[in-house]
Amino acid sequence: MLKFSSHWRNEASVRRGLAYGVFLLCAYAAWMRGGVYPQLQWPLAIFAILLCGAVLLLHAEPLRKIRSRVLRDPVFYSGTLFLLLLFSQWINSGYAVALDDSGFAAMERVPSKWVPWSVDRAGATEMLNWFFPAFAVLLVVRNILKRPELKLLLHLLVWNGAVLACVGIFQYMLGLDKVLGIWEVPRSDFFATFDYPNHAAAWLYLHAALAAGLAHDAEIKRKPRVRVAVWGACFLCCIAASFLTLSRVGAVVSFTQLLVVFFMLLRRARTYSSGTKALNAYLAMTIIILVGATLFFGAGGGALAREVAGKSMLGERSVVGDLSTRAEHIAVARNIIGDYPLFGCGGWGCDGLANQYIPKDELRSWMVGGRANVHCDPIQFLAEFGVVGSLCMAVVVAVLVQGVVAARRGALLYWVGGGLAAVFVHSFVDLPFRCPSILLVWCCLFAALPRLMQGHFSAE
């Protein structure tokens, strides 16, 4: 019994177990419908609590070092303050908007501007179930896992991405009308386990970036060709799935990733000039061209190509029209920010308060998928968590960016950094961070990059 206990309290075993724990947290969110359904979210918090508890299995000396690292980490203090804000909003909730017979919208109780509050407790609970696991992942990856465990974690994540991409592709080809053949869904354009195709696209192109980074790194370090081929296959699976979501942003990012690979192969082919290596490079370029063209013109029976080609710059259903609709939603969020600047209106508060700021006869046209969200993550975040919550998150992101900027340059950093940046830019015109599975993987990769690039990283 003592021998068993000693084995599981071994530092390397605990760290490896924590890496598996972080992966299971990310994988659960992805496979359980992106983690967006409240009834499927409670295991996320349980996983996070177990993850934190597992750290206590370490012996006194490594535990002391970890505690010292965590207490010096700005993410710990900003994250703790943000979680306290979420908890305060959860306690002081229940300010729903009611409509009278004439259609006038007003709150049954009026909250104070200077005290954290939330429209309803269900929305506040969701935020705790999202952000507590995300901060647990950040702290574990930044302060506990070492490079061998981080490499294991990245390999698990990219395999999971490829498998889920293949599931989505087969599900699409079979024309299933239920998620995994199990869950009824309100939308007909769901993909894989994601009800919202734009969430699926962001999750997939982020994993495609990770797979491309591993493949490129393995190629540079002259690892066995089978490794490059495996990571390359994972990349193509994620790219194909991202196109099949029929998300315009997903298609743009995925097509850009294919173009980068194409020009890298072109440069490689010119370097070799002739011989087997040059022939292989040209063959790979041909495959990339065929894959890109087939997916762009064939996805959805050509629906993606028709939408992109037929999308005018002006008009009601145009690029400018879409952006103007977003601007109208942002204007409502700006009113909410003006009324509740310090602590915001709580999780999903923009949707809950919409009736107060939108005329009754216009409300129906504002609803997107049944919800009047802003569709701009930073603005919606500011409206729901105020200046205090936004500053907390800004500190966390700034610390993560500083770590990446200071890290040693390499193929993995450029690829994964590009994927992380693409999701962030995407968040200005949509809501990728309103999907826990994207939030968790984004935080995990962002925190892992600086530690992986501190020394000589190998994709082995």
Image (cartoon, grey):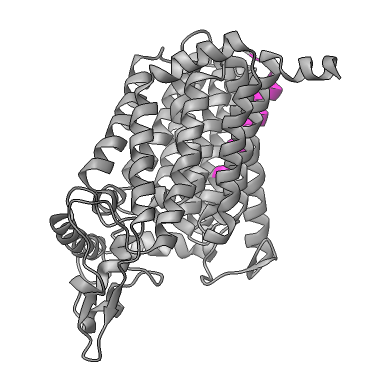
Horizontally, is 355 left or right of 262 in the view?
left
Q: Is residue 285 above or below residue 362?
A: above
Q: How many discs appear?
A: 0
Residue drawn at point x = 60 percent, y = 33 percent:
51
Q: Is residue 133 left or right of residue 175?
A: left
Is 13 left or right of 221, judged from the image as shown? right
Q: Is residue 380 left or right of residue 297?
A: left
Q: Quadrant of residue 75?
A: top left
Q: Is residue 104 above or below residue 230?
A: below
Residue 97 locus on image (x, y percent): 28, 73
Mainly helix, strand or loop, the magenta region? helix
143 versus 454 height, above or below: below
The residue under the point 52% across, 45% down is 204
Vertical comparison of 260 with 32: above or below: above
**Segment tinted magenta in the rendering:** 223-238
For image coordinates 29% across by 28% down, the residue present is 398
